[in-house]
Amino acid sequence: MTDEKESNDFLLVPALVGIVVLLLLKVFYDLYRKLTKSHHEVYFVMMGEPECCNPNDRNMNPGNNCRKYCMGKLLLKIMNRINGAKSSICVAMYNFSNHRLADCLLRAHRRGVKIRLVTDKSTCESGENKTQAKRLKDAGISVRISGEDDKLMHHKFCLIDGTSPKGVLITGSLNWTYGGLSKNCENVAFISNGRVQQFYREAFDHIWNKFSTPYYPRTSNV
Ligand SMILES: [Zn+2]
């Protein structure tokens, strides 16, 4: 009888170890699936296409009847993603003049989303783009400028909730300008993928820390 009990105890330990190992494997597998979960959407807009929704019209209402390359649909998609941001937005945008996208960033900032914007020095010193950078900075958003002479900060990407599996990377050819959203040929990809988001997050931090300086508008241009 005693021998039988000892034998059962002897089997109990490896059985428990096996269960713990299986549970750990399940946890790691779920984490792996979460990190490698991937979803993407790609948008193109084409110059010369008949317009169905004007991105500069606040009352535009893109729907199922929109043309394939609808610029309004693209703008609304970007706006919706910014409006859905929960914790952080990193924007590296060579040229940023679109006030509707700036409005979205301002609203996100007001609801507590941590926003960082790095834009290029050359575009930042001219007209509309300077206005948006100044607006955002005046509202308390961290704005930095990068680039020097012909060495441009030429990125056009926005990482929303980059450390979350529900985050999204928005990247492509599109500058956040009126021209980009009304007359050019552009492409924009919306990518939700943990590893890709991490690459962009690291690259953004690198630019932010090593290749940019705080943006202070010159008073003569204000
Ligand atoms: Zn449309």
Image: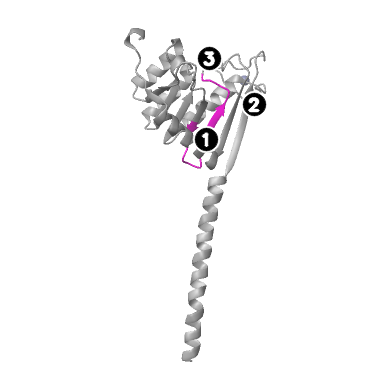
Q: Nearer the viewer, residue 7 or 113?
A: 7
Q: Residue at x 53, y 17 (%)?
A: 59
Label 3: element kind: loop
Answer whether residue 143 is magenta in the image. no
- Is 49 drawn above or below residue 33 in the view shown? above
Q: Residue at x 58, y 23 (%)?
A: 173
Residue 178 is tagged as: 3
Asked if the residue at label 1 sits under 8 Å from ligand 1, the reply is: no
Residue type for callout 2? Asn
Question: Along the polypeptide, which appears first: circle 1 or circle 2?
Answer: 2
- Is 132 drawn above or below residue 35 in the view shown? above
Q: Residue at x 34, y 22 (%)?
A: 139
Residue 168 is tagged as: 1
What is the span of residues highlighted in magenta in the rendered image?
159-176
Residue 64 is tagged as: 2
C-beta proximity under 8 Å, tags 2 and 3: no
Residue type for callout 1? Val
Question: Along the polypeptide, which appears first: circle 3 or circle 1?
Answer: 1
